Image: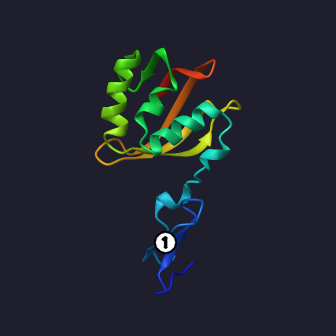
Protein backbone atom coordinates (compact mmCIF):
# COMPACT_ATOMS: atom_id res chain seq x y z
CA UNK A 1 0.00 0.00 0.00
CA UNK A 2 1.20 3.52 -0.70
CA UNK A 3 0.51 6.64 1.33
CA UNK A 4 -0.44 10.07 -0.03
CA UNK A 5 3.19 10.81 -0.96
CA UNK A 6 3.76 7.47 -2.72
CA UNK A 7 5.78 5.83 0.08
CA UNK A 8 5.24 2.15 0.82
CA UNK A 9 3.41 1.63 4.11
CA UNK A 10 3.06 -1.31 6.50
CA UNK A 11 -0.63 -1.80 7.08
CA UNK A 12 -2.19 -3.90 9.85
CA UNK A 13 0.41 -3.64 12.61
CA UNK A 14 -2.31 -2.71 15.07
CA UNK A 15 -6.02 -3.41 14.92
CA UNK A 16 -8.88 -1.13 15.80
CA UNK A 17 -8.44 1.83 13.56
CA UNK A 18 -5.71 0.42 11.34
CA UNK A 19 -2.45 2.25 11.80
CA UNK A 20 -0.28 2.89 8.78
CA UNK A 21 3.41 3.54 9.13
CA UNK A 22 4.97 5.38 6.19
CA UNK A 23 8.46 4.48 5.14
CA UNK A 24 10.65 4.16 2.08
CA UNK A 25 10.87 0.39 1.96
CA UNK A 26 10.23 -0.01 -1.77
CA UNK A 27 9.58 -3.70 -2.41
CA UNK A 28 11.56 -4.76 0.65
CA UNK A 29 9.83 -5.51 3.97
CA UNK A 30 11.49 -5.18 7.34
CA UNK A 31 11.65 -8.53 9.22
CA UNK A 32 9.21 -7.29 11.90
CA UNK A 33 6.50 -6.87 9.28
CA UNK A 34 6.14 -10.63 8.99
CA UNK A 35 4.83 -10.79 12.54
CA UNK A 36 1.77 -8.59 12.48
CA UNK A 37 0.45 -7.76 15.94
CA UNK A 38 -3.29 -8.06 16.30
CA UNK A 39 -4.44 -6.31 19.43
CA UNK A 40 -7.57 -7.72 21.08
CA UNK A 41 -10.40 -5.55 22.29
CA UNK A 42 -10.15 -5.77 26.11
CA UNK A 43 -13.96 -6.02 26.34
CA UNK A 44 -13.78 -9.34 24.45
CA UNK A 45 -11.58 -11.10 27.03
CA UNK A 46 -13.20 -14.23 28.46
CA UNK A 47 -12.16 -13.76 32.08
CA UNK A 48 -13.87 -10.79 33.77
CA UNK A 49 -11.02 -10.56 36.30
CA UNK A 50 -8.34 -10.44 33.60
CA UNK A 51 -10.39 -7.81 31.75
CA UNK A 52 -10.71 -5.66 34.89
CA UNK A 53 -6.99 -6.03 35.63
CA UNK A 54 -6.00 -4.77 32.17
CA UNK A 55 -8.55 -1.94 32.35
CA UNK A 56 -7.37 -0.71 35.77
CA UNK A 57 -3.74 -0.67 34.64
CA UNK A 58 -4.52 1.12 31.38
CA UNK A 59 -6.70 3.67 33.19
CA UNK A 60 -4.11 4.28 35.95
CA UNK A 61 -6.39 3.17 38.83
CA UNK A 62 -4.04 1.67 41.43
CA UNK A 63 -6.64 1.31 44.22
CA UNK A 64 -9.06 -0.50 41.89
CA UNK A 65 -6.20 -2.72 40.67
CA UNK A 66 -5.31 -3.65 44.26
CA UNK A 67 -8.94 -4.50 45.02
CA UNK A 68 -8.64 -7.36 42.50
CA UNK A 69 -6.06 -9.23 44.63
CA UNK A 70 -6.68 -11.62 47.51
CA UNK A 71 -5.00 -10.35 50.71
CA UNK A 72 -2.45 -13.21 50.60
CA UNK A 73 -1.84 -12.98 46.82
CA UNK A 74 1.51 -13.36 45.13
CA UNK A 75 2.99 -11.60 42.10
CA UNK A 76 6.00 -13.11 40.34
CA UNK A 77 7.74 -10.59 38.09
CA UNK A 78 11.29 -11.86 38.31
CA UNK A 79 11.31 -11.45 42.10
CA UNK A 80 8.28 -12.67 44.09
CA UNK A 81 6.03 -10.22 45.95
CA UNK A 82 3.72 -11.72 48.57
CA UNK A 83 0.89 -9.92 50.33
CA UNK A 84 -1.01 -6.71 49.84
CA UNK A 85 1.70 -4.19 50.83
CA UNK A 86 4.47 -5.85 48.82
CA UNK A 87 2.25 -6.06 45.74
CA UNK A 88 1.10 -2.45 46.12
CA UNK A 89 4.71 -1.22 46.38
CA UNK A 90 5.66 -3.29 43.29
CA UNK A 91 2.61 -2.06 41.33
CA UNK A 92 3.28 1.59 42.14
CA UNK A 93 6.94 1.30 41.13
CA UNK A 94 6.75 -1.05 38.12
CA UNK A 95 3.31 -0.40 36.65
CA UNK A 96 1.52 2.77 37.72
CA UNK A 97 4.64 4.86 38.35
CA UNK A 98 5.75 4.35 34.74
CA UNK A 99 2.28 4.80 33.18
CA UNK A 100 2.17 1.27 31.81
CA UNK A 101 -0.21 0.38 28.98
CA UNK A 102 -1.09 -3.27 28.30
CA UNK A 103 -2.38 -4.43 24.93
CA UNK A 104 -3.55 -8.04 24.77
CA UNK A 105 -2.35 -9.89 21.68
CA UNK A 106 -4.09 -13.20 22.43
CA UNK A 107 -5.59 -15.42 25.09
CA UNK A 108 -3.43 -18.53 25.47
CA UNK A 109 -5.96 -20.85 27.17
CA UNK A 110 -9.70 -21.46 27.02
CA UNK A 111 -10.34 -19.86 30.42
CA UNK A 112 -8.66 -16.65 29.30
CA UNK A 113 -6.42 -16.64 32.36
CA UNK A 114 -3.14 -16.65 30.41
CA UNK A 115 -2.69 -13.79 27.99
CA UNK A 116 0.07 -12.79 25.62
CA UNK A 117 0.59 -9.03 25.82
CA UNK A 118 2.55 -6.14 24.43
CA UNK A 119 3.48 -3.61 27.10
CA UNK A 120 4.51 0.03 26.71
CA UNK A 121 5.51 2.43 29.46
CA UNK A 122 7.38 5.64 30.11
CA UNK A 123 10.59 4.62 31.83
CA UNK A 124 9.71 0.98 32.61
CA UNK A 125 9.56 -2.22 30.63
CA UNK A 126 8.22 -2.07 27.10
CA UNK A 127 7.85 -5.18 24.94
CA UNK A 128 6.17 -8.56 24.74
CA UNK A 129 5.22 -10.69 27.70
CA UNK A 130 2.84 -13.28 29.10
CA UNK A 131 0.59 -12.77 32.12
CA UNK A 132 -0.72 -15.91 33.86
CA UNK A 133 -3.49 -15.44 36.42
CA UNK A 134 -4.54 -17.86 39.16
CA UNK A 135 -8.02 -16.94 40.31
CA UNK A 136 -9.65 -17.90 43.61
CA UNK A 137 -13.30 -16.98 43.78
CA UNK A 138 -13.44 -13.54 42.19
CA UNK A 139 -9.94 -12.43 43.23
CA UNK A 140 -6.43 -12.85 41.92
CA UNK A 141 -4.46 -15.33 43.99
CA UNK A 142 -1.30 -15.32 41.84
CA UNK A 143 -0.03 -13.33 38.87
CA UNK A 144 3.05 -14.56 37.02
CA UNK A 145 4.63 -12.20 34.49
CA UNK A 146 7.13 -13.49 31.96
The residue sitting at the right extreme is 110
The answer to whether 108 is drawn above or below residue 21 in the figure is above
Tell me if 120 is positioned left or right of 6 in this view: left
The residue sitting at the bottom extreme is 5
Q: Position of residue 49 (x, y in %)?
A: 60, 31
Circle 1 residue: 28
Question: Can residue 97 be seen from the camera position used here?
Answer: yes
Which image quadrant: the N terminus? bottom right
Q: Identify the secondary structure beneath mark 1.
A: loop
Q: Position of residue 67 (x, y in %)?
A: 49, 26
Residue at x 49%, y 86% (from the top left corner)? 6
Tell me if 137 is positioned left or right of 65 in this view: right
Residue at x 45%, y 40% (from the top left corner)? 57
Task: Decide: few, some or many residues near mark 1? Use Cα within 10 Å; few <14, some 14-19, many ≥20.
Answer: few
Residue at x 62%, y 50% (from the top left corner)? 41
Residue at x 52%, y 42% (from the top left corner)? 55
Question: Can residue 146 be seen from the camera position used here?
Answer: no
Q: Position of residue 81 (x, y in %)?
A: 37, 19
Residue 76 image-quadrant placement: top left
Residue 106 image-quadrant placement: top right
Amino acid sequence: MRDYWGNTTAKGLFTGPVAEFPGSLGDQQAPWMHEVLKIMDVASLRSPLVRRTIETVNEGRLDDFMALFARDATVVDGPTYHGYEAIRTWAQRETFGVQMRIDVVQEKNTEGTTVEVNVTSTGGYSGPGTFSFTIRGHLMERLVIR
